[in-house]
Image (tube, helix red, strand yellow):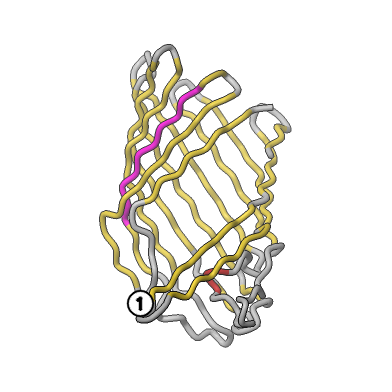
Amino acid sequence: MDYALSDQFGISLSVPFLWQKEIVDLQFNNAEYVNRGIGDVSIWFTYAKKFKSVNINSAISLKVPTGSTDEESENNLAFPISMQIGTGSFDMALIVQSSWYLGKQRKFSVENQLALRLNSSGNKFKAHPNYKFGDQYMVYAGLGYHFLLFNLVTDLFLGTSYQYRNQDEFEGGFENVNTGGHWLNSSIGLNIFLTQKLFFSLNGGAPLYRNLNGLQLSTTSQISAAINVVL
């Protein structure tokens, strides 16, 4: 939910509902974990400014540990940290995004984004008290093409993102060697405005390069879709 305080400033509230499922293939049978519920709530403060050929959007957030961190399986074993709904920590995030439009018709644009997330130690995990997820840094650069598709305003984006994440830390400052690393992904996105207050978005991405620490799970190609409504 977003609320505009003025033409430039706004406040947003994000309440995620997560449904996670993980299947581990074993030699004789599979281990399946399912966990769902309301995750960590975030409050965002936003600032946007439009110039003649450049639009700038920025946001800073505070995430509070409202999601559960002690969920267990049917045999009373604690879910892995990656399968818990919450993180048990207060975290901060910052995003700065710019769109530089080329030419008078503004059909093409250069898109850039810088994002970072700074995490504190969580104190609610039973197995690993004061576990700290690694800080994350992301840079995105791409091109945008803005046109009419059957009289519908449409945005098409193509770009590349680089993400770096520090290693997680256990209590006492010991590093989790199976976390952190470098990710380089390609991405493509599409926005279709059905009306001025209703638009559909579709996004996809695929890995170009990975250099991860130790042994860890990571996503391959992924796709997401969303419907956005302005009230």
Answer left or right for 108 relative to 196: left
Q: Specify whether residue 145 is painted magenta.
A: no
Secondary element under disc 1, as helix, strand or loop, is loop
- Residue lying farthest left? 208
Res 79 → quadrant: bottom right
**From the image, which quarter does the C terminus lie in?**
top right
Res 190 → quadrant: top left
Q: Which residue is mark 1?
A: 215
Q: Kindly identify the amino acid type of the residue bearing the numbered disc 1.
A: Leu
Residue drawn at x 38%, y 79% as measured from the top left: 26
In this rendering, the answer to whether 131 lies above or below 183 is: below
Residue 179 location (% of width, % of height) = 42, 74
**From the image, which quarter does the N terminus lie in?**
top right
- Residue lying farthest front? 28
- Residue lying farthest top? 151
Residue drawn at x 38%, y 74% as measured from the top left: 25
Residue drawn at x 35%, y 78% as measured from the top left: 214
Viewer-side residue, 215 vs 61: 215
Residue drawn at x 34%, y 60% as measured from the top left: 183
Residue 197 location (% of width, % of height) = 60, 22
Residue 85 location (% of width, % of height) = 62, 64
Highlighted range, magenta = 184-193
Label 1 Cα crowd, 10 Å radius (few <14 / some 14-19 / many 20+): few
Res 65 → quadrant: bottom right
